[in-house]
Image (cartoon, helix red, strand yellow):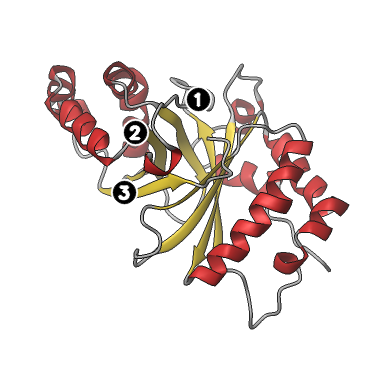
Amino acid sequence: MKSKSIFLSSNIVLILFSTFFSVNTLLANVPGRQFYQLIIYHIENKLQEQRVDKYLSEAYLPAVHRMGIKGVGIFKTYHIDTAAEKRIYVLLAFNSLKELNEAGTKLNTDKQLLASGADYIDAAYDNAPYTRKEAVIMYAFAGMPGLKQPVFDSPKEERVYELRSYESATEKLYLNKVSMFNKEEIEIFDRIGSQPVFYGEVIAGSRMPNLMYLTTYSNMKSRDEHWKTFGSDPKWKRISALPEYQHNMKTADIKFLTPASYSDF
């Protein structure tokens, strides 16, 4: 076999998703709410970075574009050359789990992809282009049902994308945190200009129950200024002290990223 599917079966995702929601809710035609897939490559050196870059830019991204998916975000660990953890992230959006599942089949049979990505696809077991690969499947927040393209005047290489993952102790507390975002926090991020790309309820991943979201800034200085504004915002101070929102998040994992030169975002 030349390749293996990089997408979870929609049936598997249905089972995982039902942990929090009924299947009827999942299958309902909710206008605009997308499903996100975040693919994460763990790499250890410059050579692996270059091989994954070559595959994504010359084979994978053109293939995804041929399928009609235009807004694909590809990001790297901030200052990846000196970072202890080196990762490359690929973000895609789909209108349904059926569309997500079908995309995997199309990619695995795309002749141009197989030819252009041969170095990556046919890599030997002892010369792999990455050390580990994982995928996270998310359901867009009701408060922001689809991806948003950030708008910047700054050079691409200076931009900072902040990926946050918030884990909760229980499913009930997790849903409470999601509700807090939908009712309160999204409005604050929008108002202060943090330019969110997505907010997602994780329905399949290695860390659950949790949510993930991505905000963007022209540079690190702008990022720090925006978070200072968020922390001092009167609305945030009020809602963060409300009894109904206490202890709804136990762990925050924060990753700083920069867009790849060939990323759509």
Q: Is residue 250 left or right of residue 261?
A: left
Furthest toward the bottom, the residue is 126
Q: Name which residue lies at 42% across and 53% down.
A: 207
Tell me which residue sits at (32%, 45%) in the image: 168
The picture quadrant where one finds residue 230 is top left
Callout 3: helix, strand or loop? strand
Amino acid type of the residue tagged 2 in the rendering? Tyr
Q: Secondary structure at mark 2?
A: strand
Across and down, in percent, residue 191 comes to 29, 16
* Residue 95 x %, y %: 66, 28
For this rendering, which residue is in front, 58 or 182? 58
Left or right, residue 134 beside residue 226:
right
Q: Nearer the viewer, residue 224 or 147?
A: 224
Disc 2: which residue: 217
Give the amino acid at mark 3.
Ile
* Residue placed under numbered mark 1 in the picture: 148
Sequence order check: which comes first, mark 3 or mark 2?
2
The kind of secondary structure element at disc 1 is loop
Q: Quadrant of the N terminus?
A: bottom right
Task: Measuring from the top left, give residue 93's x and y in whole percent.
Answer: 61, 34
Spatial distance from mark 1 to mark 3, Cα to Cα?
Answer: 20 Å
Can you identify the residue that label 3 sits on? 254
Q: Earlier in the sequence, mark 1 or mark 3?
A: 1
